């Protein structure tokens, strides 16, 4: 998780706390990154990029429906 935070996959709600707490969206991003690493053998920077692109696609689809 520390490496994922360092790579920018997700940010804790309050990084100053000793034990990180994540929002629902951040937790989903962490789980998605882990699945990409485990199932597709994607490295962490690649997983971070893939998540950003997937979110961009989702946003564009939502915008198109409006």
Image: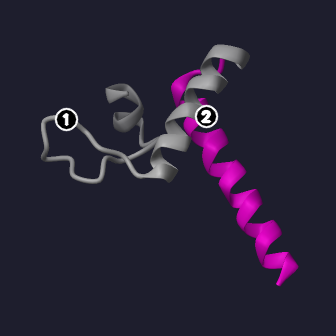
Give percent across and percent down for residue 5.
36, 37
- Residue at position x 36%, y 46% in the image: 22
Residue 61 is drawn in which quadrant?
bottom right
Seen in the picture, residue 17 relative to 31 is either above or below; the reply is below
Query: Which residue occupies 43% across, 44% down?
Result: 10
Count of labels in the image: 2
* Colour option used: one colour
Against 65, residue 50 (above or below) is: above
Under tag 1, what secondary structure? loop
Residue 11: x, y in percent? 36, 47
The quarter of the displayed image where residue 37 is located: top right
The extreme right residue here reads 65
Q: Examine the rendered structure and indicate whether residue 59 appears above or below residue 31.
A: below
In space, the residues marked 1 and 2 are separated at their CA atoms by 21 Å
**Residue 46 drawn in magenta:** yes
Tell me which residue sits at (66%, 25%) in the image. Answer: 36
Q: Position of residue 12 (x, y in %)?
A: 31, 47
Local crowd at mark 2 within 10 Å, few (<14), some, or many (≥20)?
A: some
Q: Residues within 10 Å of mark 1 (few under 14, many from 20)?
A: few
Q: Position of residue 15 (x, y in %)?
A: 20, 47
Question: On the rendered structure, is 34 left or right of 61?
Answer: left
SS class, disc 2:
helix
**In the drawing, does residue 25 fall left or right of residue 52?**
left
Magenta residue span: 41-66
Q: Nearer the viewer, residue 6 or 33?
A: 33
Q: Splitting the image into 4 quarters, where does residue 6 fall?
A: top left
* Residue at mark 1: 19
Look at the image and say whether residue 37 sits in the magenta stretch.
no
Disc nearer the start of the sequence (1/2): 1
Residue 32: mark in rendering: 2
In which quadrant is the C terminus drawn?
bottom right
The mark closer to the camera, 1 or 2, is 1
């Amino acid at each position: 998780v520390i490496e994922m935070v360092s790579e920018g996959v997700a940010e804790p709600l309050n990084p100053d706390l000793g034990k990180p707490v994540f929002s629902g969206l951040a937790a989903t991003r962490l789980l998605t990154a882990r699945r990409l690493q485990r199932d597709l053998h994607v490295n962490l920077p690649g997983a971070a990029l893939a998540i950003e692109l997937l979110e961009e696609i989702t946003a564009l689809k939502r915008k198109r429906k409006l």
